[in-house]
Amino acid sequence: MSEVKISEMRFEDIPEVAAIERQCFSEPWSEKGFRSALEQGYSVYLVARMADSNQIAGYCGLLRSFEEAEILNVAVRGELRGRGIGYAMLSDLMEHGRKRGIRRFTLEVRKGNAAAIHLYEKLGFLSVGIRKNFYRRPEEDAVIMWTPEIR
């Protein structure tokens, strides 16, 4: 993996994060959406920065609900994928969550996104169901994934 530094997202990171979001998703969050998420006390967002350039390589976030959390956004710049950055970010994000009392994590992923599904399985997520036609542009089912409960 390339050297990355992972830290909590700051408001000044939002324009660069939103640019990555637009690159990666057909229905991207706006800068306003990220700003709102950071203002909420029940969200945690991390960014991974390239150690040599300080460029944001990727970001991820979760929304906490009692002892559970939904992973909302996971993205790595296209040219930096396959270097372990997503795994490193999500591992850190889940550890942040555990320290805050989160015992289970969930997410939805495009059924055709085999690379992401494999990453989530490496992190302990299990496929538990399908949400029909969950995604638009293009229309696609979502795989619902959960981690086993941490006792």
Image: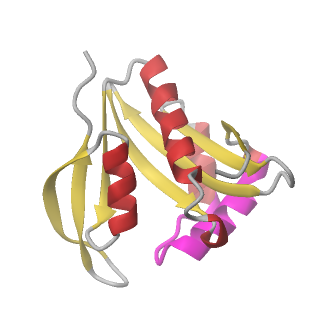
Residue 121 vertical placement versus 22 (above, below): above
Magenta-colored span: 12-31
Magenta stretch secondary structure, dominant: helix
Position in image of residue 24 (x %, y %) = 54, 72
Residue 24 in the figure: left or right of residue 106: right
The residue lying furthest to the top in this view is: 151
Q: Is residue 62 shown in magenta?
A: no
Between 124 and 145, the one lying in front of the other is 124
Identify the residue at horizontal 65%, vertical 61% (top origin).
31
- Is residue 69 shown left or right of residue 128? right
x%, y% of residue 7? 69, 36
Q: Position of residue 110 (x, y in %)?
A: 31, 68
Visual colour scheme: secondary structure
Total tally of numbered discs in the picture:
0
Looking at the rendered image, the quarter that the C terminus falls into is top left
Q: Is residue 8 above or below residue 132?
A: above
In percent of width and height, residue 49 lies at 74, 49
Q: Residue furthest front?
A: 1
Query: Residue placed at 86% from the left, 55% from the top?
Result: 53
- Looking at this view, name the residue that lies furthest to the right: 53
The verdict on residue 15 being magenta is yes
Q: Residue at x 36, y 45 (%)?
A: 122
